Each structure stands twice: as structure tokens, then as C-alpha cells.
Amino acid sequence: MLTIKFIRENQELLVKRLQVRNLKAEEIEENLKTLITLDDERRDNQTQSDQILSENNKAAKLIGQLYKEGKRDEAEVLKNEVASRKDKINSLQERQTAVQEEMQALLLNLPNMPHPSVPAGNTDDDNEVFKPCPTALPVLPDNAVPHWDLVQKYNLIDFELGVKITGAGFPLFRGKGARLERALINMFLDEAADAGFEEIVPPLMVNEASARGTGQLPDKEGQMYYMEKDDLYLIPTAEVPITNIYRDVILDEKDFPIKLTGYTPCFRREAGAHGKDVRGLNRVHQFDKVEIVQIEHPSKSYDTLMEMLNHVEGLLQKLELPYRILRLCGGDLGFTSALTFDFEVYSAAQKRWLEVSSVSNFETFQSNRLKLRYRDENKKMQLAHTLNGSALALARIVAALLENNQTDEGIKIPEALQKYTGFAMIS
RNA sequence: GGAGAGGUGUCCGAGUGGCUUAAGGAGCACGCUUGGAAAGCGUGUGUACGUCAAAAGCGUACCGAGGGUUCGAAUCCCUCUCUCUCCGCCA
């Protein structure tokens, strides 16, 4: 959520940059104008009601004094004055509540302002290739098969059992498949720890305040599984519980950077997704992911974003997977993000790129909702910057690993992963 | 799930309708003192919004959250929430 202060001071810039998200200039202008008009009214209301409250506070004290002195009549006169001012206060405050609600609704529906480097564009076709694949794309023999056949052949994942137990999109890993999954999780957590991230095991369900804090609500309401009876949401990513550690927290400048990591399953409803794009592990309702989160000083957050990019890149190199890095265009950029880089790995049997990581800088968009602040050198409150990235999302990594490394003898495990799997080949 | 007790500032803790501008203590910061430190003494010590060019200042709100009663609420009433103790259930 952008602050009203920022909006007031950066109207033209906002109109310009939000157009990158394919919003119409006139609509943005109108929204901003409405917001500022409402804010003017809010200020005016507050000035008026503060003044009346002040008068009433003074009168209340005086009444007490008059009673003590036995001057009942004078007290009664004052009481009537207070009562008449109360009507005014009530209508003022009623109006103020309405104004604030209207402002809040508009602010919640205003997306983050994209970074200047974000290219204009509508869909993922318009994303900019920030770094093309540094290695040649693997070419598989003619008898190569997609991962959904491989997992069956080697008994690694049973999708049908998942359907039996739960439903479509809830894969069941078994044997070496389960072990491979756990090995990847362990490797990613170790790598994150080596890079200075503190490991967190967070709750897998969050309350409404947390979902709101990181921006899943109200924007992505339908994406989350919701337990009505307890009013809790299953997390769609570890970002939600981990970032919310710092909701309503005031940091010191010396606390930066805060680096956290955590493995969690992620639950996504993915309502309406069907067809061959979602086959096998390409899109599931439950998948494992190791997330990295950083809370950083605004002046350093873009350097930090690059560091996180390097970390994710290092993981993919260790796994010997062909990858490329995209800079998301305005149309594909998440609601809460200012700049996002996606990592895609090439899944050679499907002959397609799969998104395995998304690394974003949210600047102050989340921290404004979270009330995550720090004191600067002048002891003034400032909003911190939040960043996060997948490092990495497991299901699609498994798909690419299986497909790219298939041989007639079996599936080769990359060397860096072997100490975690305990085997070098799945056969 | 049942019964009871609680939630006050950075922390401890007083406060059952106006003398609270939230006592007192601890911590922290700065100053005095000192060869240096401790002790001692003094001063300061939250957040949000408004006002102001800005700072200072001033005003308003905030004692778990939200409502209500009252001229006036940390204090009384209602709802919710969290914590603790006991019982029940339980990996």
C-alpha cells in the first residue's frame, strides 16, 4: 500500500509509472485526485473535531471544579454547551469514518509503483530476458519422456494416490522421489544458512492480519485455502508468516539487513487452471518451497535484490540446470512488487521454460501495511524495505531435474545434491 | 471444551469516576561530578493524526481490541481476543 503522503507528493510520477502496468492514465489520475480530495477532507474534519474535543475537555474539567464549589447552575449551563457540541462532533466523526474507509478502499486497490527499469507490456511474452541461458539447452534423445512418465516409471510420485487421498494437484512422493524432495529442501536450507539467512519454521496457517500485511488480502483472496471455522488461511508461501514476524515492529538502523529463510509447503487453490500446462508437477495445489526474506534499509534494497538474484543463480548452477532470468514487465508484475526477476529452468522433455523462482523488491509497499519501520539517524520513523525470493520452489525443479537428466541407465543426480540424496542415480 | 484469575509505557509496578499532565522504581540517553569508573545529583525518554514552509511548540487520540454509560472513563457496563492456573481431551 502506498502512503497518502507519497501520493500527494508524487502524483505525476505515479501516473507515469503506473501506466507501465497497463492502467489507463485517466483512470489513475482520477483515482489519485479522488484520494487527495478525500485526504483534504479528512484533514479538515480532524482539525475541526480536535478543536471541539479540546473545548469539551476544558469544559469537563471546569464542570468538575464548579460542582466542588457548589456552583451547580453554572455547571448545568456548561453541560448543555457540551451536549450541543456533541451533536456536531458525532456528525463530524461519522463523516470522518466514511472518508477514511473510502480512502482505505482506494489505497488497498492501488498497486505498487513499478521501478523505472520495469518494461511496459501486457503478458509474460513481454518480459525482458535479463540474462539469457548461459549454457546450451540440453537436447535429449528421441526416446526421452516428460517427468509425469518418469515418476511413474521409477515410482517416485503417485499422482493418482494423491487424488484418492485428497484430490487433483496433491502429489504423493514416495521412495527415492520422497528422498529427492527432502534432499533438495535440505540443500536449499543449507545454502541459505551459509549465505547468512536465519532459518525459521513458521506456522502454516495465518490469521487475517498477516494475510493483509503481506498483501495477499484483499488482492488474492481466492488463491488461498480458508478455514472458515477458525478464520485462518493456509499459507500460499512462507513469505506470509516470515515477513509478518516484523509486523508492528520498530527497528534500529543497525538491525539491517534482516535475513530469514524457511522451508514450508505452500498451498494454492489455482482456481480455474486446467489443461496440459498444469500437467504433472507444472502446477499443483501443494508444493514445497524454501523462501528467503530480507528486510533492508531503503538505500540498500536494490543491491540486496541483486545479492538475492546471485544466491538463486548459484543454486541453479549447483544443480546444473539450464536457466534464464527475466525481468517482469508491468503487466506481469505482481500487485505488491516494484521490481521482480523470475528464474525459469528449461524442462527439456516438455521443451518449455518453467518458473522456479521469483525474486522481488516490495520497497515500502508491504512495510506500510505491516507498520514495519525503523528510526533513521535523525531518530525519525521511516518505512523499511522488504524483499523476498524463492530459493527455490521444489516441484518444478524436480520436474526439470528428472527430464533433463534421464538416460537409458536411469536418472542422474547432480553431484552437489548427492550428499543429500545418498544416491547418484535413480534406476 | 468447562471453571477461575488477569492484560497499564522499553521493563517492573501503583492506580475502583475529576487532585493522572498515568504515581513510584528499573533501564536507556545526555549533563554535572571523577585521574577513570561506580555511586550520587540533574534533565530527558512512546506512537499516530492534525496545525506550521520547516523545526520547536500546541491540539487530539491511544492503558489488549471494539462498542456503550457520563459533563468527565485506565477505572463502570457489553462483546471479542490473548495469557496464566485448575479440570477434560490429546501427539
Image: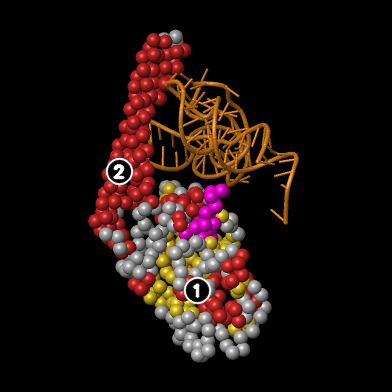
Q: Is residue A424 left or right of residue A278?
A: right
**Can you tell which quarter of the image residue A162 is in?**
bottom right
Q: Position of residue B18 (x, y in %)?
A: 49, 21
**Mark 2 Cα-neighbour bin, 10 Å: few <14, some 14–19, many ≥20:** some
Q: Nearer the viewer, mark 1 or mark 2?
A: 1
Q: Chain of mark 1?
A: A
Q: Is residue A178 left or right of residue B47?
A: right
Residue A279 is labelled as 1
Q: Chain of mark 2?
A: A
Q: Position of residue A267 (x, y in %)?
A: 53, 62
Q: CA distance from mark 1 to mark 2?
A: 48 Å
Task: Work out whether B84 lies above or below A397.
Answer: above
Q: Is residue A154 left or right of residue A21?
A: right
Task: Work out whether A41 lies above or below A333.
Answer: above
- Residue farthest to the front? A164
Quadrant of the drawing holding the C terminus of chain A: bottom right
Q: Which residue is mark 2?
A: A38
